[in-house]
Image: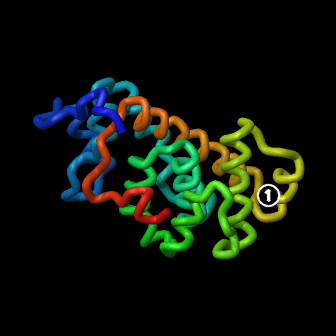
Amino acid sequence: MSMTRIAPLEPPYDAEVAEAFLRIMPPGMAPLKLFRTQAHNKRVLQRMFAGNLLDKGSIELRERELIILRTCARCGSEYEWGVHVALFAEKARLTRAEIAVTLNPDPDLSALSAREVLLLKAVDELHDSSGISDALWMALTHHYNSAQILEIISLTGSYHTVSFITNAAAVELESFAPRFAQYA
């Protein structure tokens, strides 16, 4: 990765930014470099947090994380992929092999359930064509309702945006986050 293009803000933060960080970060954890980079534009930071899909949604945590990891991998966002592996993979009960599947362009999907395979295929189709084929849509409807399918699409789109930011701004990788090479 090239040199960081927008240096993350350093403390002390102004009151509005500090409050936003307190709301989003786990107690005792410093704000992520991505968030400190976004804080250069308070409106963008607030909108990012307002559109955050990391709450309890209509799909399972494990499914959400597979979608996020695959999206970030397809976009080449080692930063965000690594942060999610570090902070959510264990809680989502993802094995090392399942995490590795998200990186592989032609993965062996035998480690995943039929539902999870559909999620990775949906991410891939959205990434490649900005749409979902009729055949895949029908397959998704056998496992997910309309609200869940909309969440799948929204998660994929949201993490495309996050990936664009981390890649374009060359956000420095977090020291605690694993790298692609550790799972390839």
Q: Is residue 108 visible?
A: yes
Q: Report the side of 160 relative to 169 (left or right).
A: right
User: What is the quadrant of the N terminus in the image?
Assistant: top left
Residue 148 position in % (x across, y down): 69, 54
Q: Report the side of 173 relative to 100 (left or right).
A: left
Amino acid type of the residue tagged 1 in the rendering: Leu
Residue marked by disc 1: 140
- Residue at coordinates 17% horizontally, 30% vertically from top-left? 14
- Residue at coordinates 28% horizontally, 42% vertically from top-left? 33
Element assignment for label 1: helix
Which quarter of the picture shows residue 121? bottom right
Q: Report the side of 31 relative to 129 (left or right).
A: left
Q: Report the side of 103 relative to 52 (left or right).
A: right
Residue 57 position in % (x across, y down): 57, 56
Q: Nearer the viewer, residue 69 or 149?
A: 69
Q: How packed is label 1: few (under 14 Cα within 10 Å), some, or many (20 or more)?
A: many
Q: Nearer the viewer, residue 98 or 155?
A: 98
Q: Which of 40 and 77 is in front in this view?
A: 77
106 over 93 or under it: above or below: above
- Residue at coordinates 20% horizontally, 32% vertically from top-left? 9
Residue 105 position in % (x across, y down): 64, 54
161 over 53 or under it: above or below: above
